Amino acid sequence: MSIIDVRLSRTEKRGTGEELDMDLARLIGIIIVFGAPAIIGGGLVFHWFHSWPVVWIYEILLVLLALRIAFNTAGKSAPSGH
């Protein structure tokens, strides 16, 4: 069984494979976009407060925000370019 056969069988069971792939791509993209604020913002928070618990609170809030945005937009399809 080739990769194409597996993809076709998955598509038949769950709907179109393009929708699943696009949702996953958008989810991963949103999480990657939040990586820069996590790294840079974490450094700035530590510079301002000199406290690791404050940095962890910032990081946890940022992860919760990223997950909320990712899961809210993952169910929506991307706008069509053509």
Image: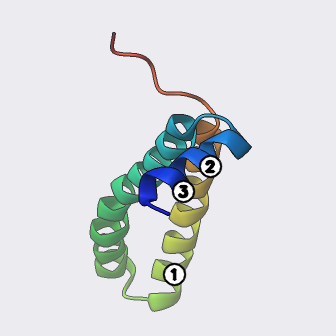
Q: Secondary structure at mark 2?
A: helix
Q: Secondary structure at mark 3?
A: helix
Where's residue 42, x and y in %? 36, 74
Circles 1 and 2, Cβ within 8 Å, touching? The answer is no
Residue 6 or residue 18, whichever sits in front = 6
Q: Quadrant of the C terminus?
A: top left
Mark on residue 56?
1
Tell me where residue 60 sits by quadrant.
bottom right
Give the residue at x 67% y 40%.
Answer: 12
Camera-side mark, 1 or 3: 3
Q: Nearer the viewer, residue 71 or 42?
A: 71
Q: CA distance from mark 1 to mark 3?
A: 41 Å
First along the sequence among labels 1 and 3: 3
Asked if marks 2 and 3 touch (Cβ < 8 Å), the reply is yes
Sooner in the amino-acid sequence: mark 1 or mark 2: 2
Numbered circle sitting on residue 6: 3
Rounded to the nearest angstrom, the CA distance separating label 1 from label 2 is 43 Å
Residue type for callout 2: Ser
Could you tell me residue 31's position as x and y percent?
Answer: 44, 57
Q: Above or below — where is 15 with respect to 56?
A: above
Percent position (x, y) of residue 59?
A: 49, 72
Closest to the observer, 18 or 41: 18
Q: CA distance from mark 2 to mark 3?
A: 5 Å
- Between 74 and 63, the one nearer to me in the picture: 74
Residue 81 screen position, x and y as percent: 33, 15
Q: Quadrant of residue 63?
A: bottom right
Residue 9 - label: 2
Task: For mark 1, give the secondary structure.
Answer: helix
Q: Quadrant of residue 76?
A: top right
- Viewer-nearest of discs 1 and 2: 2
